[in-house]
Image: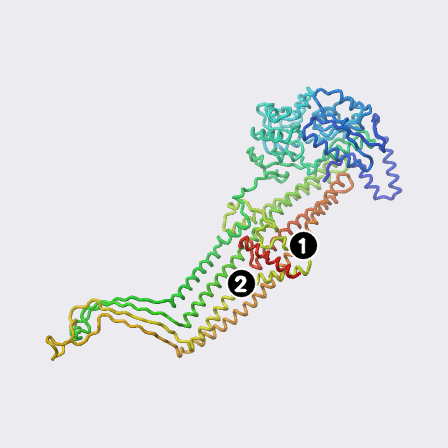
Amino acid sequence: MDSSTFAARLCVNRWFADMARRSWAQGLAVALLGGLLGMMARPPQPAAAQSAPDEDATVGIVLGDSSQAHRRAANAIRRELRSLMRPERRVQFPEAYRRVLDTEGNADLKRLLSGETGPSVVIAVGLSASHRLATTSRPDVPVVAAHVLDPSLQGVPRAGDASGAANLTYVTEPDLVRENMALLRSLTPASAPALLVPARMLEAAPALADRMRRRLGRQDSSDANWRVVPVRSTAEATLEALPAGTDAAYLATPLPLSSVERDRLISGLRARQIPAAVHRGRELVDRGALATASAPSVAPVPRRTALHAADVLRGAAAGSLAVALPSPRTPYVNEATARRLGLSVPDALRLRVTLTGTPAPAPTDSITYAQAVRRGIGANYGLNARRSGLEAAREDVRVERGDLLPQVRVGARAQQVDADQAAASFGAQPERTLSGSVSFSQTLFSPQEWGDLAIAKRQQAADAAEVERSEQDLALQVSRAYVSVLQARALAQVRRSDLALSRENLSLARARQESGQVGRQQVLRFKTQVAQSRRTVLDAESRVEVARTRLAQVLARSPDELVGVAGLSPSDSILTLPESVFAAYGHTSATRQRLTDFLLEEGLSNAPELQALDEQIAAARRGVEAGQQSYWAPTVALEGQLNSRALEGGAGTESLSLPGGPPGGAALPQAPNTTWNVGLSLSLPLFTGLKRDGQIERGRARLSQLKAQRREVRSSLEERIRSRTEQATSGYLSLREAEAGRRTAQETIDLVQDSYTAGAADVLDLLDAQEAVLNARLAEVDARYSFLLRLLQTERAIARIGPLQTADERTAVRERLRAFMDGGR
């Protein structure tokens, strides 16, 4: 918005606005009557040297010094004046009419203002030049002073809304010093402030410092002990000139310092714990000053100065032009500087100012989207329980595999029997024995055991797919909570911007009220609007905290631990399907269909839901096959055993001797102490009481159920992928439309603000435009984060959520998509 349209034009524009509503005859009569009254009411002014309408206009420039800040301000005024006068005549800025002020008030400056074959108008740039020329008695050439701090402080002529002095007009905001100090004191007490003004301004007028000190003390309701300090060519010299005990600094802009020296001055003030208020503009506040009460988005002084010069060139009397700049008040506070000074911005003030330098969480404290997804998956209690179940399934496989591996058993036995019984056994059963055995078995073939192993493996794979599905679902849940925080934060920012716009419009209404163009009711209307905007800001900020709490709960963390949430855009590389995919393939029905076909193919081949069902179907089928094989396939096993009697004693250890044998008798043969056997066993159940038939039929029914369930799940997945793809595509197109609508609404509010300032639009037009831009910004935020959420939902539909994929996997998906789309052309 160009807020520099001056108050003198308000009446004229309102006359034309009223004339547009009348018939052409009535309009002509009103215009003639208005012109006659204006000529009668205009005070007599001395004639100024004016160029003829068909001649080039020459303009002189007087700079306070040759600093970069003054040269830049002069260039801005040149551009504005040439733009304003281009339809009428060409404006020249001859080098011969350019002066740089010195401390002696040289004769060249006097000759420039004498009017003898000189410029048509002279523009003073900078506080020093503006003060020198504004206090020059009766210049022969019209003077436009671009930078007057405060007419009452400087002793610059003022009569009503204008200067009232011949050939003099200027640009000022009379109450801005008081408003800046009020803003500064809302942050910190200031009993000994120092006003920093260019040294040349004070050197050329020795009594000016005392006058400004007295006036400031008289105007200041806080009984402050004001000091006036000259700004030297270096920051070091300026800081040395500060009196001891200074507790605040007021920087009168533009400062006659280079960019480096300005930074050094602000750093030096911070180092001395001296808060600094800036007269106008956000640049120095962004560089580290504390605050300013006037930080319009577009600098109004160059435009307003150029308007004054253009009016003078068109023949207007300089002394009758309104000098007060109806610039909207946009308070601006650097929160980082406040923290360095040990200050805090009160909550009530936060709703009235625009904050810059708000400390962002350190990168180590901010959680990114990828970190949030991974932490959410790692910390979820239910998912951890599923992982434990998956470990149990792995052990089930080991259990079933163990039945098919060799089985080795070792046994030992100590036995004692009755002595008479042992003696009667003739050595076959000693009274005391100690024996051991080793046996082994190896199943060579068993339909049931091989089937159980295959089923266990399939069930383990199904459980793993179920865990993956749970991870995908949980990742989407975390994504929703994460996007909710980002959306709530963006909506809060929009509400804060609307509050700033309401305050800006309130300032415009106050400016029009001060110029007599509107009544107090319009100011009250915007005060009400500001109050409503503050309420919506508070509500929006509470929603941010609610969203942060929800995200912390999903991550199983305390909200206090969630310091910051990093941003995420639809074009972020962490996404498998970023915005560029839909920008490339979302504009025509043919490419959208091809995109849908690819995502269907990708999603159905990768869906953990289908993978889990496929494994369960394979397990059920293997169970039926094992049951059918048990009718004819026997269980075949290799078995062996080794037995050894290690010790024996007592009765019955000797065998029976046969009579007629060799001396001592012949003993009956006995079994050796060590025996072994090896064999091959086959077993085939012939009849199990119909149990086996029931198991087979149950397995077949289970198999049919799983197949039907898979068809249902596949159909649901297809529908989900198609709908998510269509929603993401429409979300992308909606975002583009919302962005265009926001730009249009912003252009509209800028135009309506200009028209309202000029009196060509009423309060309802401005309120409607503000509501339109608010709705457009809200719609853009909603479209942006709805599209982002739809992207994440589409990734979930195809089981390709970005943080769960590696960078190579994400790239591979996009490469397959590109090849698929290129293959269809």
Task: Answer yes or no: is residue 822 visible.
Answer: yes
In what quadrant of the picture does the C terminus appear?
bottom right
Numbered circle sitting on residue 144:
none
Where is residue 803 drawn, in percent x and y? 54, 53
Q: Is residue 257 above or below residue 613?
A: above
Residues at discs 1 and 2 in contact (Cβ within 8 Å): no
Residue closest to the eye, 366 or 91? 91
Apparent side of residue 254 relative to residue 403 in the rendered image (left or right): right
Apparent side of residue 287 relative to residue 745 in the rendered image (left or right): left
Q: What residue is shown with label 2?
A: 609
Distance, label 1 to label 2, CA atoms, is 31 Å
Identify the residue shown where x is 33% and y is 71%.
Answer: 639
Q: Amino acid at mark 1?
A: Leu
Residue closest to the eye, 395 or 785? 395
**Mark 1 vs mark 2: which is more N-terminal?**
2
Q: Secondary structure at mark 1?
A: helix
Q: Is residue 432 above or below residue 748?
A: below
Task: Answer yes or no: is residue 130 visible.
Answer: no
Q: Amino acid at mark 2?
A: Glu
Apparent side of residue 273 relative to residue 316 in the rendered image (left or right): left
Identify the residue shown where x is 15% and y is 72%.
Answer: 654
In what quadrant of the picture does the N terminus appear?
top right
Q: Quadrant of residue 329?
A: top right
Where is residue 111 drawn, in percent x and y? 78, 22
Q: Residues within 10 Å of mark 2 (few under 14, many from 20)?
A: many
Q: What residue is shown with label 1?
A: 733
Most extreme residue toward the bottom is 660
Residue closest to the eye, 197 or 440? 440
